Image (cartoon, coloured by chain):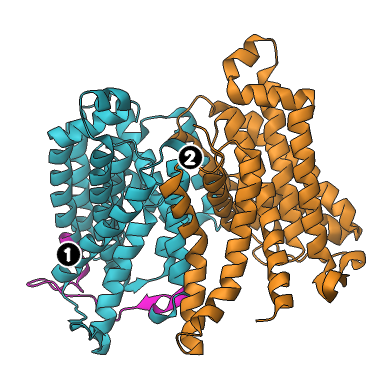
Amino acid sequence: MSVILLIEQILNGLQFGVMLFLMAAGLTLIFGVMGLINLAHGSLYMVGAFVAAAVAAWSGSFLLALAASLVAAAMFGALIELTVIRRLYARDHLDQVLATFALILIFSEATRWVFGSFPLFLDTPAWLSGTVILPFGIQYSAYRLAIIIVGLVVALGLFLLITRTRVGMRIRAGDSDREMIAALGVDISVLYTLVFALGAALAGLSGALVGAIQSVEVGMGEPVLILAFVVIVIGGIGSIKGALLGAILVGLTDTLGRTLLPVLLSTVMDASAATAVGSALASMLIYILMAGVLLFKPTGLFGTA
Amino acid sequence: MIRERYLNLIILAGLVIVPAYALMVDEPFTITLATKVVILALAGVGLNLALGQGGLVSFGHAAYFGIGGYTMGILASHAQNYTPLMTSPFLIEGTNSMPVIWLVAVVVSALLALLIGALSLRTSGVYFIMVTLAFGQMLYYFAISWPAYGGEDGLSIYVRNQFPGVNTLVPIQFYGLCFAILLIVLFLVDRLNKSPFGLALDGAHQNEERALTVGINVYRLRLVAFVISGAITGLAGALFADLNRFVSPVMFDWHTSGQIMIFIILGGVARLFGPIVGAALYILLEHFLGGLSEYWFIYLGAILLFVVLFAKGGIVGGLSKKEMSHGG
């Protein structure tokens, strides 16, 4: 295996990790501030992708499609927060899981009803469709590189928002003591809606960005949701830093495992068996990583409680 | 409002009368639906032990359901093709004998639950939900990418497995077999819930610190409950595979875990007969709403949302006046 291919796979892993971060950041923020486990987060990812595909097909503008996906996902997020989610804050996790699972069923079927069962396609914009030449003569997809940059910029923005702004201060305060911040006169329900919409917008953005490299279809959010859970378990609930580290770790492990394991195994067995065993093992690798973290740090790398 | 015990008797009577009536009017499809209810209820009874009695919100019980199904599929496919399962270090042959398959399914799913439980129970609360979900998905992806037993396409078994003295291909006889297993398991689980073990499990659910203080090893207690729970769900998986004569990775899918959980919440958390009512309602909804609209999951979602938000205690809780000691 050549070094260039390896670097390309590392970049792919990074891109995957950055996408997972956008999902996991919202989930972990919502859990940290409101104590809510939200399975419907994957549906917001799907909403983002579908809205982006629809708007891109209608207007032809990729940037407009991205903006629309952000707004639509945030609006949907605020809508379900106001109607359903806020009734769940005081409930136990089982109720939260079941209610948000019910939301998935409703969202998925409603999307199938509106858009049909066939996947939609979202094209990468012309100005990002080629490859770029990186140092050492490595060619890499401009679009995937753009995703990595967008993801890292969002991560930085989120970090600044939470550590440097007034809203961020309230979010942190809500994270550490919900009753106290309400007693100090902060309108906690507005804050909750805001945080939920923020998380939803991140999920929607992530869905729209990925929509251009995969097909946009019903149920596309579910595998990503579960991977985002793995990320959170590894990184520690409520920690944005943990989400970033966990996401990149999971992204790299999964991508490199799928490429390297069959190659490594082919040194000890014949090629077709190595491919079969390698891909089966690679699909389990991130869960094994999660199990390893659980053995040593049950609360995740940056978790506290 | 009636006592839960009488309600349970009515439920059992329903499980006898409906198939008997279907037999009289010669409606084998209704018997098949009833068989499905009984098997899915069994899976729910398994999960309810961990979730209801133990408060362990496992979102990965599809793992045991699936491994039970695949145990049946793998053993029966080897018997069907007359190929041994393995030859070294010792010979293992496939089989189409139900009792053997059940035993293997119970042991294999118990071992899997021991492994997953030992890791997952190191966490609690929302971590536990995510970790069990993740391990369930791990097996799903493994089943898809492992080519030996059909991969994504699944595995078909052409003839239903055999049970001594019963013609399992006759729907009512197979139903009787499944119903008998459900009754036995219900009896055992009821005894278990009322035993010191079950009471300690419930106690640890209500107040973990107090249970620890009186010297209960909560981790081990929960692990044992989790293993029994997984084994029951695994047995249900083996029966479900035999009902369909087909296994596929869908049995491992997290929607299956969600479904088993829905049976419990519809019927009533920690109610012995809750999963039966829940599974029956689910199958009825699937049958009638699914006939009305292609998009019946919307209605299922709406009903589930309503039950969770406004009708805690499910149907058994709503119909019987006996208060539970805890909200589940």
**Left of A129 or right of it: where is B152?**
left
The span shown in magenta is B149-177
Mark 1 falls within which chain? B
Q: Residue at x 22, y 47 (%)?
A: B14
Chain letter for the cyan part: B
Position above or below: A268 against B171: below
Give amino acid for label 1. Leu
Are the two marked residues, 1 and 2, in contact with CB atoms closer than 8 angstroms?
Answer: no
Q: Position of residue B17 (x, y in %)?
A: 19, 51
* Chain displayed in orange: A
Q: Can you name the residue that lies furthest to the left here? A: B165
B156 is within the stretch colored magenta = yes
Residue type marked 2:
Thr
Query: Whole-percent x and y of residue A228?
Result: 59, 50
Which residue is under mark 1? B103
Q: Position of residue B104 (x, y in %)?
A: 20, 67
Between residue A231 and residue A34, name the one nearer to us: A231
- Location of residue B12 with respect to A60 vertically, above or below: above
Residue B170 appears anywhere in the view: yes
Near-viewer residue (A56 or A193)? A193
Camera sees residue B270:
no
Which quadrant, please, contains the N terminus of chain A? bottom right
Q: Position of residue B122 (x, y in %)?
A: 37, 42
Q: Place residue A149 in its image quadrant.
A: bottom right
| Residue ID for mark 2 | A299
Q: Secondary structure at mark 2?
A: loop
The quadrant in which residue A140 appears is bottom right
Numbered badge on residue A185 = none
Give the SS element for disc 1.
helix
Q: Residue at x 25, y 26 (%)?
A: B211
